[in-house]
Image (tube, grey):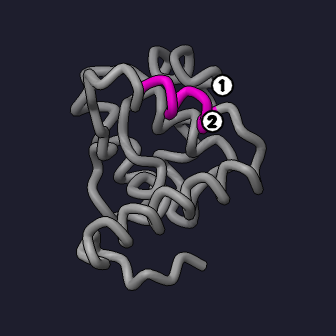
Amino acid sequence: MKYGERLKYVRELRGLKQNQLSEFAGVAQGLISQLENSDTAGGSKYTAQIAAAMNISPTWLATGSGPMEPVVYQTTDAQIIEAMKIMENLDGQFKEFAIKSLVGLADLSTGGKNGTDGHNG
């Protein structure tokens, strides 16, 4: 399935008309039409916006790989929620360092049984 076919498939699955999707995504309706009808569209700089408007994975929309629905982790642990809020607001290299540190800590605590090889970059 091509990019435009995936876009149209999900738009119709969500019961949206092109103008509704364009409004939700903050793009022109003509862009939605162009992307859906193009045989050569392989993505768009608006892919993330369009995917977010339909609650689908931008990677799936752009490439067709991975799950269509985004993988979402939920927790009610207040400490984890607060830590994630802090990490979410970190700048690039600091966020990357925090994530690698957490993965490394998890590997240490489980003897590397978290699906990583212990080498995080």
Q: State whether residue 57 appears in this view.
A: yes
Residue under pointer 2: 31
Residue 67: image quadrant is bottom left
Q: Front-most of 77 and 8?
A: 77
x and y, in percent, of residue 98 in the image: 61, 52
Is mark 2 in CB contact (under 8 Å) with mark 1? Answer: yes
Q: Residue furthest front?
A: 109
x and y, in percent, of residue 118 in the image: 43, 81
Where 25 sits versus 67, above or below? above
Residue 106: image quadrant is bottom left
Q: CA distance from mark 2 to mark 1?
A: 5 Å
The residue tagged with tag 2: helix, strand or loop? helix
Q: Residue at x 29, y 39 (%)?
A: 73
Q: How many marks on residues?
A: 2
- In this picture, residue 89 sits left or right of residue 23: right
Residue 74: image quadrant is top left
**Residue 64 in magenta stretch:** no
Q: Amino acid at mark 1?
A: Ala
Q: Residue at x 37, y 71 (%)?
A: 108
Q: Which residues are magenta?
A: 81-88
Residue 28: which numbered mark, if any? 1
- In this picture, residue 12 sits left or right of residue 44: left
The residue tagged with tag 1: helix, strand or loop? loop
Q: Residue at x 41, y 26 (%)?
A: 79
Where 28 sits versus 121, above or below? above
